[in-house]
Image: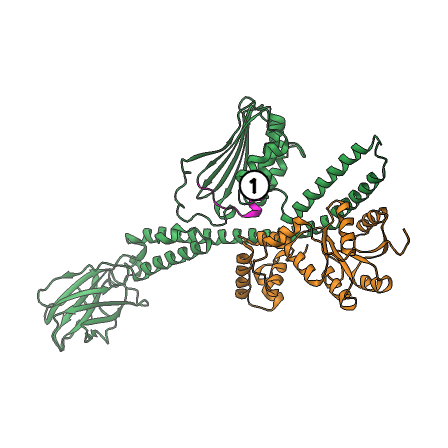
Amino acid sequence: MATCLNRPRSGQLAACGIVVSLLGLCFLVGGCRESRTDVHVTGPAIEFTGVPAVSRSDAVGDAAKLSTIKGRVIGARPGQQIVVYAHAINDYGQWTWFVQPFVREPLTKIESDSRWRTSTHPGAEYAALLVEPGFQPPWITPSLPTQGVAAVAITQGWPPIWQSWWFPLVCVVAAAAAIFALYGVWLFRVTNTLKLRFEERLAERMRVAQELHDTLLQGVISASMQLDVAVDQMPADSPAQPALRHVLQIMGQVINEGRNTLRGLRSSTESDRDIELAFTRIPKELGFDHQTAYRVVVEGTPNPLQPIVGDEIYSIGREALVNAFRHSGASSIEVQLEYAANGLRVSVRDNGCGIKPELLRFGREGHWGLSGMRERAERIGAKFRVMSAASAGTEVELSVPGHIVFQNPPSNGRWVWLPKPRFRIAQHEVPK
Amino acid sequence: MSERARIRVFSVDDHPLLREGIAAIINSQPDMFMVAQAANAEDAIAQFRKHKPDVTLMDLRLPDQGGIEAIIAIRAEFPDARMIMLTTFEGDVDIKRALEAGARGYVLKSMPPKELVEVIRQVHAGKKRIPPQLAAQLAEHMSDEALTEREVEVLGQIAGGNRNRDIAERLFITEETVKVHIKHIMEKLGASDRTQAVAIGVRRGIIQL
């Protein structure tokens, strides 16, 4: 089982659960019942291997109910047979031994492998007698016969399955296995749904890219071409020319960015393998990198992310950073990426002024982008939390389960919940 | 300069706005003018027959068939036709296919207009012209193993957001075969997942947007 548990793949989880269930079931059916046999006579000996469960008192002597009783004989001579009695209360309220299963067939043969087996009505106790050939068993008797009897064994009905010591254990194991299997199935379905969603989104991106290409990009390229021609036709000393050249330059940049976006099919993380680097670049991209100490800290061993999930994480983190840089007035901002076996945790922390509680609660539409971040987090099955205090700044925390965020969920640390205590500082900018 | 001496340029592009831009550039040059325009491959072939332009600027993507197919069709009839591929992207596979089809130049729409008119002049003079950045792109993947037709088809289906099962159904192959194709595609493109494979495919012009 250890190998199974170590690999938290959903299919395997389900398989593990099923195996455990089956084991439990086998245990249940094959149940290890101890035999409780009282041997009264030395020499040959009788042993019970199967006895009906303890009967309820109202069932004792019930003529309509038959159960199997079986056992073994050690040291029986040829011709000897078994007589089974059940101890029950007769019509006069007295305890009596009744021959089993029926008065017309009171004798049970011993098989060649020294086993015997017959049926019996329910009793409080059962007796098996090893009798000599020609023995005439009394049908009903207050006490067991001794004449012509080579051996006697008496047993009470065995406790029913649910009273045995191992039954609760099996129940617990089976329940655990069932939960495990259900969890596996759930995980499998969630992962599958997400995959499907990713595929849909890939198609959607292609469509959007196509539209961008067909409309916006071609239009801007055309405008840029015509502007270029117009600028060329202007007199060289025209005061508008430098301004128009600048516009042309901006358009060229826009075209290039647009082309890059389309080529990559993704808007944000061109370095899709390295979200850390992407975060490190954000302040520079946004033109914020002068006033605030900013660093990206990575804990644990980086593990490649699912690209689309990585994009979403990047977008959420970027939004949080924009808020922090723009509104918090913080002197220090930190992004922490925590790679653990059970998932990725991204925290964006600042020591600024905090978000007003009413904003935090209602997440006013379009403000702080909180609702957008929350929606994005929901889409990738991540937990999203914003903690903020007026004096202590703001922390935005995003936790994404490993089976969603990682391309290859780590296999060797499912039970290691604590991140490795290794710190790596990606970039540290000292305030100027 | 007389009408005959100027370079007669023919523009094929399905975006009217873009044709307008190209026309503005061409007509602003003293030594060339726009003789005709077409918005699809069929019209392009018909217009070519009618005007027999000196230089044709062909878009890679056209609504009815690819620009490369249009080049092949025109050159089958007019082997001396001088054509320049004018597109948005610099995928090495596109460049290669265009050159194989007989294009004499490959220019990006985003390049400065001066470069475009320069390429037109050179191609008109009988030269071949690939801007250096595109040549580098081409060289980078020269030794790469090309995707088979089937693999290109599968990649296109992935880009369409289809699951393996859907792809199998559409291409009349088993899901296992689809998986094998995808494995090969990833290996050849050096991609680690489907999204990346599609991105690389688009970037290199293996599949078109």
Q: Nearer the viewer, residue A90 or A75?
A: A75
Question: Which residue occupies the foreground of this view, A268 or A271?
Answer: A271
Nearest the viewer among A316 and B123 is B123
Q: Mark 1 points at which residue?
A: A313
Quadrant in the rendering for residue A80: bottom left
Q: Position of residue A181 (x, y in %)?
A: 43, 54
User: From the image, which quarter does the C terminus of chain A lie in?
Assistant: top right
Percent coordinates x, y for residue A371 in the rendering = 63, 37
> In this image, A134 relative to A421: left or right?
left
Label 1: which secondary element: helix
Span colored in magenta: A301-311
The N terminus of chain A, quarter of image? bottom left
Is residue A309 magenta-colored?
Answer: yes
Residue depicted at x 64% and y 43%: A267
Chain identity for the colour green used in the image:
A
Amino acid type assigned to the residue bearing label 1 in the image: Ile
Q: Chain B is drawn in which colour?
A: orange
Residue at image coords 68%, 62%:
B100
Residue furthest left as drawn: A42
| Residue at the image position 16 percent from the left and 69 percent from the top | A73
